Image (spheres, helix red, strand yellow):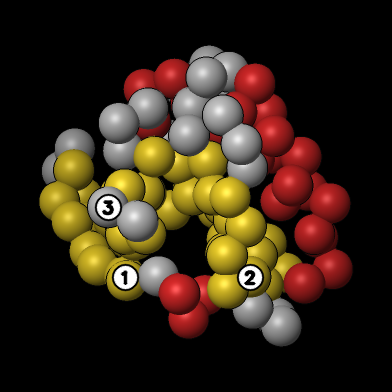
């Protein structure tokens, strides 16, 4: 899999119910993603490191960019693989 990096204005945002909570989601090219974490513009390296780790563990990952932030998303079809990434274990629970 490849890391997808998109401008925030290219996605369609939505909210959905999952495991007793409302989560932020997005859709791009008929794929749906769940928001993992938001990084500030100074933490670009962390966002790309996390997204790369997700891909290395077999999950589908995407980053959306704004001038002020980077959002790391995980594909809904592969989000179960994301929990094996140590940095995400607590976030994805």
| Cα separation between marks 2 and 1 | 14 Å
Query: Which of marks 3 and 2 precedes in the sequence?
Result: 3
- Mark drawn on residue 13: 1
Label 2: which residue? 65
Q: What residue is at 70 percent from the left and 81 percent from the top? A: 68
Helix, strand or loop at mark 1:
strand
- Does residue 39 appear to the left or right of 38 in the view shown? right
- Residue that sits furthest to the front in the current view: 29
- Mark drawn on residue 30: 3
| Cα separation between marks 2 and 3 | 19 Å
Classify 16 as above or below 93: below
Q: What residue is at 65 percent from the left and 21 percent from the top? A: 56
- Mark drawn on residue 1: none
Identify the image quadrant of residue 24: bottom left
Classify 84 as above or below 24: above
* Mark 3 crowdedness (10 Å alpha carbons): few <14, some 14-19, many ≥20: few
Helix, strand or loop at mark 2:
strand
Is any part of residue 89 visible from this angle?
A: no
Identify the image quadrant of residue 40: bottom right
């Amino acid at each position: 899999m490849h890391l997808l990096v998109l401008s925030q204005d290219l996605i369609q945002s939505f909210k959905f119910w999952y495991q007793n909570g409302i989560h932020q989601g997005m859709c791009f090219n008929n794929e749906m993603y769940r928001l993992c974490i938001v990084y500030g513009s100074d933490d670009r390296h962390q966002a790309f490191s996390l997204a790369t780790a997700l891909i290395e563990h077999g999950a589908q990952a995407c980053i959306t960019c704004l001038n002020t932030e980077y959002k790391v998303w995980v594909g809904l079809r592969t989000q179960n693989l994301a929990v094996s990434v140590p940095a995400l274990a607590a976030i994805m629970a």
